[in-house]
Image: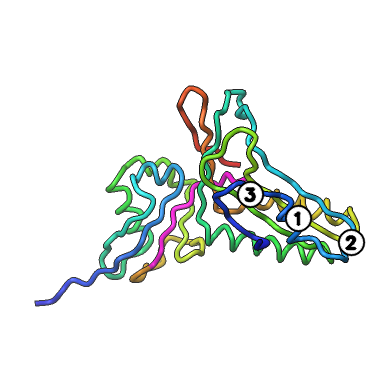
Amino acid sequence: MPLFAIVRDPIDPRTLEAAVWSEACGGVVIFLGVVRERAGDGRPVSGLAYEAHEAMALAEFAAIAREVHEKYAGVRLGIVHRIGELRVGEIAVAVCTAAPHRAAAFDACRYAIDEVKARASIWKKERYADGTGEWVSN
Amino acid sequence: MSAVTTVTVRVRAFARMRELLGESEFELVLPDGATLVDCWDALRARNRKVDALAPSTRIARNGRVAALLDECVAEGDEIALLPPVGGG
């Protein structure tokens, strides 16, 4: 699978891991962003609807990857974000890093997910149990 | 008789902007020499409520966020309306 992707089908983190890992890597970190059952204000959530400007989001993933490679030598990175209607418990985003040692893998993974959330052209609408919904930004 | 020349741009709207404008993608026909400000005015004509989103919405022309709205648009441009992002 490609290292950077916007997908509509469920994300399989192991497939991403297999694409990211190489024999030089002794540490692999996978961050999964998962739909949770409550909004920030405590309201019950039935699901999240995601949409993206795919070309711009992918360009941002690539820019983040360049930054990761500059900051953390030897780190390999993959980012997959799902769009469409997601239910509670489904994976919205997977970020996988692999590095010779764990410290760089952890640090790079944290950096990448924070930047994806802050910069990528992706939007989500919380759908509440009462049928209403609201666009939420990070 | 002189023909009035126009430029046609493709607007892509996301999230709340998409809902306010009623479509995710549509064409706008603007006078030749139009800028992103003129583009925004044409969007306001569709729904005045977009004004409330103006301070937080970024506008990208052909995939690049415009720093200033005084740049002219060209035939076939993609104009993307980007509210604050919420990925992850």
Name the element at disc 1: helix
Which quadrant does the N terminus of chain A fall into?
bottom right
The residue closer to the viewer here, B70 or A42, is A42
| Left or right position of A13 against B51 | right
Amino acid type of the residue tagged 3 in the rendering: Ala
Q: CA distance from mark 2 to mark 3?
A: 27 Å
Q: Which residue is mark 1?
A: A17
Q: Which residue is mark 3?
A: A118
Q: How many residues crowd around disc 2 within 10 Å: few (fewer than 14), some, or many (20 or more)?
A: some
Q: Which residue is mark 2?
A: A100
- Which x, y percent locates residue A80? 64, 54
Residue drawn at x 68%, y 49% as measured from the top left: A12
B35 above or below B20?
Answer: below
Segment tinted magenta in the rendering? B77-88
- Which x, y percent locates residue B24? 39, 50
Quick check: is A132 in the magenta stretch? Answer: no
Q: CA distance from mark 1 to mark 2?
A: 15 Å
Residue drawn at x 32%, y 42% as measured from the top left: B48
- Which x, y percent locates residue A137? 57, 41
A79 above or below B64?
Answer: above
Between marks 2 and 3 in the image, the one whose residue lies nearer the viewer: 2
Amino acid type of the residue tagged 2 in the rendering: Pro
Give the chain letter at badge 3: A
Q: How many residues crowd around disc 1 within 10 Å: few (fewer than 14), some, or many (20 or more)?
A: many
Contact (Cβ within 8 Å) of mark 1 with mark 2: no
Q: CA distance from mark 3 to mark 1?
A: 23 Å
Say yes or no: labels 1 and 2 on the same chain: yes
Residue drawn at x 47%, y 60% as measured from the top left: B60
Q: Earlier in the sequence, mark 1 or mark 2?
A: 1
